[in-house]
């Protein structure tokens, strides 16, 4: 019996493994694409750059914030939102490539801000009041570690 | 008419030069392959030391901008050396060794290759002398700003990119010459054996992909000297057309060695050599197609995301086939020869490749990538790959290379063998811990390339630093026997007049 299994693996193992992998690739790729196109994936929900993740029309009461990133800070660097309020952030860089990484209880917002192109972030403010810090995630020079801002939920 | 006949001066530069190159240039294929792998090891030591020192800086979560220039210069040295010279040197060294060892193929352009080798090193030194603080991306427009250089200022910062350009041009030429000479001097008929097939394919890939980097570097140079506009997105895409394939040069060359030698240590045939050969096409084609997965947080259209997502997963499937080929070869064997240090190195390389590969499966996914993009999770994943399949895989090949070249008159002593074995295990174990500490911290949001970070990540940083230093000791345990072997060989050969049989 053991020999039977070994010889089966020997004969069909490689092709089976390859087909299994192909099926897995198919499932993963389809799932990912489906989520991106339908707007349900994590990063889509939180705003794929290029505005493709922004719901249209914007939900009622959406707070729209324009933020400029520069070496080394953001203006404004505070977003004040009500619990559960929809927030749209439009990001623009004045100099080099920066990032915007914000860990929320419901998921992670993470986009790069490329000079010359706007990046869009859309999320619902957490239901728990408090301060949530975002940080620059793309290396942008010696002040990179000190570039951050706060979402104040009150 | 030779040079000697044509010039009748009592002292001629041409003759002098010939004597010098005859004496100081390597004139054998094996020797030249060692020139590249040994230089790779020296650069590895340099960039490793840089990392060990900047890890000390990272023990303080409250660093200020005052220490930033030192930290980022060390980080740049680490990244530049790794990607711009160490990786291609190891690939070329392995390529030369594979063709020499398995097929008796030879280099013929020794003087040219030697000159290019030294020029490549010189270019690297010129690049690093500027004290760039760009890590290794050199992303425009950041990489073109004067504030990202310590020692070069004004138009002189172009020297960094000119230096890198020289290095990459020389490397591309050597890679081309290696493959060309190898094919020309092949005497055997029929299929090329598997190790040189893989090693030379990925040596050739240097020739196909490095011109993209050279174009980027040229663009930067023109940007600095002639104020040509450098579009960040286009430059970044162009950069990654080299920057992605480059990470596969060594691992896939090493795959060739694993395919050839793991069966020997397992005492049975490779599980399906046919698939191992077909896999080469998959790996070669998709390596070139998946680069934009480095840009999943960039403003890119959805169709590029979909394409990169699917093609990266197909490449992962190719690696999965490799894992099966090799894993089943070991699994279906009655025994595996761990007592041979090469067998041990290849086994650890394969094991590490599997361990490092699984956490990477979420990275190409559009839906999951942003959770960890630009965090230590990614850093942990690719460093685990580097520490195992790249470094340990290369170690197996280099040990074989050294035994071949020096072992006859300077064999490894028992103590040396023990030291290397201990070094391999200490390296593997320590860096496994560092890698997982990095991934755990990154998953929780520790951003890379930061000198100040939320204090709750301090225990992770401490773990990384302590175990990285332990891994460094592992390297020393391997390097000391290798160094003593080479010095002993030199003494035996040139001072005791020992002759190799
Ligand atoms: Cu920034
Ligand atoms: Cu990549």
Image (spheres, rainbow, N blue to C red):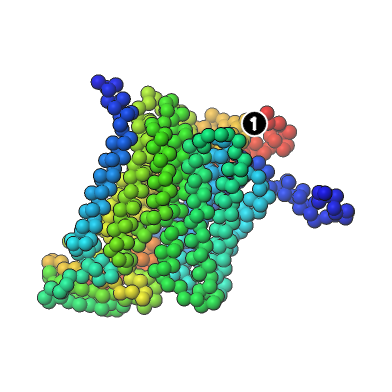
Q: Residue furthest front?
A: B190
Q: Is residue A153 visible?
A: no
> Where is B441 relative to B298, above or below?
above
- Quarter location, residue B155: bottom right
- The percent coordinates of residue B501 (x first, y second) are 68, 28
Residue at horizontal 30%, vertical 66%? B301
Q: Is residue B15 visible?
A: yes
- The percent coordinates of residue B393 (x first, y second) are 46, 41
Residue at horizontal 42%, vertical 26%? B268
Residue at horizontal 12%, vertical 76%? A61
> Where is B113 relative to B397, above or below?
below
Judging by the rendered image, the residue that carries numbered circle 1 is: B409
Apparent side of residue A124 relative to residue B287 in the rendered image (left or right) = left
> Where is B256 relative to B175, above or below?
above
Subunit bearing disc 1: B
Between A69 and B257, which is closer to the camera in this rendering? B257
Ligand 2 has an atom within 8 Å of the beta carbon of the residue at disc 1:
no
Q: Residues within 10 Å of mark 1 (few under 14, many from 20)?
A: some
- The percent coordinates of residue B182 (x first, y second) are 59, 43
- Quarter location, residue B367: bottom left
Apparent side of residue A115 relative to residue B131 in the rendered image (left or right) = left
User: In terms of secondary structure, where does tag 1 sit?
Assistant: loop
- The percent coordinates of residue A106 (x first, y second) are 17, 61
Apparent side of residue B211 relative to residue A44 in the rendered image (left or right) = right
Between B287 and A94, which is closer to the camera in this rendering? B287
Residue at horizontal 25%, vertical 20%? A1
Apparent side of residue A47 relative to residue B313 in the rendered image (left or right) = left
Total tally of numbered discs in the picture: 1
């Amino acid at each position: 019996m053991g020999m039977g299994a070994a010889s089966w693996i020997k004969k069909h193992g490689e092709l089976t493994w390859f087909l299994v992998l192909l099926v897995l690739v198919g499932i993963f790729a389809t799932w990912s694409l489906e989520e991106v196109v339908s707007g349900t994936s994590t990063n889509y929900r939180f705003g794929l750059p290029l505005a493709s993740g922004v719901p249209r029309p914007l939900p009622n009461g959406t707070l729209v914030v324009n933020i400029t990133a520069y070496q080394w800070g953001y203006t404004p660097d505070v977003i004040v939102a009500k619990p559960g309020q929809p927030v749209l952030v439009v990001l623009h860089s004045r100099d080099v490539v920066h990032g915007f990484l914000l860990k929320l209880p419901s998921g992670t917002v993470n986009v790069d801000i490329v000079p010359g192109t706007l990046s869009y972030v859309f999320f619902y403010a957490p239901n728990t009041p408090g301060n949530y810090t975002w940080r620059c995630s793309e290396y942008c020079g010696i002040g990179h570690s000190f570039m951050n801002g706060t979402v104040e939920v009150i | 008419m030779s040079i000697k006949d044509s010039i009748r001066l009592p002292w001629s530069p041409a003759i002098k030069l010939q004597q010098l190159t005859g004496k100081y240039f390597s004139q054998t294929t094996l020797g030249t392959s060692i020139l590249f792998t040994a230089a790779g090891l020296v650069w590895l030591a340099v960039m490793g030391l840089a990392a060990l020192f900047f890890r000390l800086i990272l023990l303080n979560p409250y660093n200020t901008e005052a220490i930033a220039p030192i930290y980022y210069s060390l980080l740049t040295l680490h990244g530049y050396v790794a990607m711009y010279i160490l990786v291609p040197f190891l690939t070329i060294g392995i390529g030369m060794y594979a063709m020499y060892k398995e097929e008796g193929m030879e280099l013929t352009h020794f003087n040219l290759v030697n000159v290019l080798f030294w020029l490549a090193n010189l270019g690297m030194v010129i690049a690093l002398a500027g004290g760039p603080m760009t890590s290794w991306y050199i992303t425009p427009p950041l990489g073109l700003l004067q504030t990202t250089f310590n020692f070069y200022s004004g138009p002189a910062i172009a020297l960094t990119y000119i230096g890198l350009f020289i290095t990459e041009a020389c490397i591309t030429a050597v890679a081309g010459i290696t493959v060309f000479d190898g094919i020309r001097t092949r005497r055997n008929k029929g299929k090329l054996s598997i190790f040189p097939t893989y090693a030379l394919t990925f040596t050739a890939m240097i020739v196909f992909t490095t011109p993209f980097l050279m174009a980027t570097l040229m663009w930067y140079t023109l940007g600095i000297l002639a104020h040509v506009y450098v579009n960040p997105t286009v430059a970044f895409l162009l950069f990654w057309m080299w920057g992605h394939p480059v990470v596969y040069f060594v691992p896939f060359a090493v795959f060739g060695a694993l395919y050839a030698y793991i069966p020997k240590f397992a005492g049975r045939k490779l599980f399906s050599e046919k698939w191992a050969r077909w896999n080469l096409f998959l790996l070669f084609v998709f390596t070139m197609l998946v680069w934009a997965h480095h840009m999943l947080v960039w403003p890119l259209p959805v169709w590029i995301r979909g394409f990169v997502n699917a093609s990266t997963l197909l490449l992962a499937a190719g690696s999965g086939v490799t894992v099966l080929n090799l894993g089943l070869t070991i699994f279906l064997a009655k025994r595996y020869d761990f007592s041979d240090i090469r067998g041990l190195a290849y086994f650890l390389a394969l094991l590490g490749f599997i361990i490092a590969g699984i956490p990477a499966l979420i990275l190409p996914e559009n839906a999951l990538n942003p959770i960890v993009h630009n965090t230590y999770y990614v850093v942990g994943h690719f460093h685990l790959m580097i520490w195992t399949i790249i470094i340990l895989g290369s170690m197996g090949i280099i040990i074989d290379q050294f035994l071949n070249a020096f072992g006859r008159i300077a064999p490894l002593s028992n103590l040396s063998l023990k030291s290397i074995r201990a070094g391999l295990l200490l390296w593997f174990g320590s860096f496994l811990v560092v890698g997982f500490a990095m991934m755990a911290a990154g998953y929780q949001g520790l951003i890379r390339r930061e000198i100040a970070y939320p204090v709750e990540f301090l225990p992770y940083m401490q773990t990384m630093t302590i175990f990285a230093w332990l891994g460094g000791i592992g390297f020393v345990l391997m390097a000391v026997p290798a160094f003593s072997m080479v010095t002993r060989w030199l003494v035996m050969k040139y001072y005791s007049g020992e002759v190799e049989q």
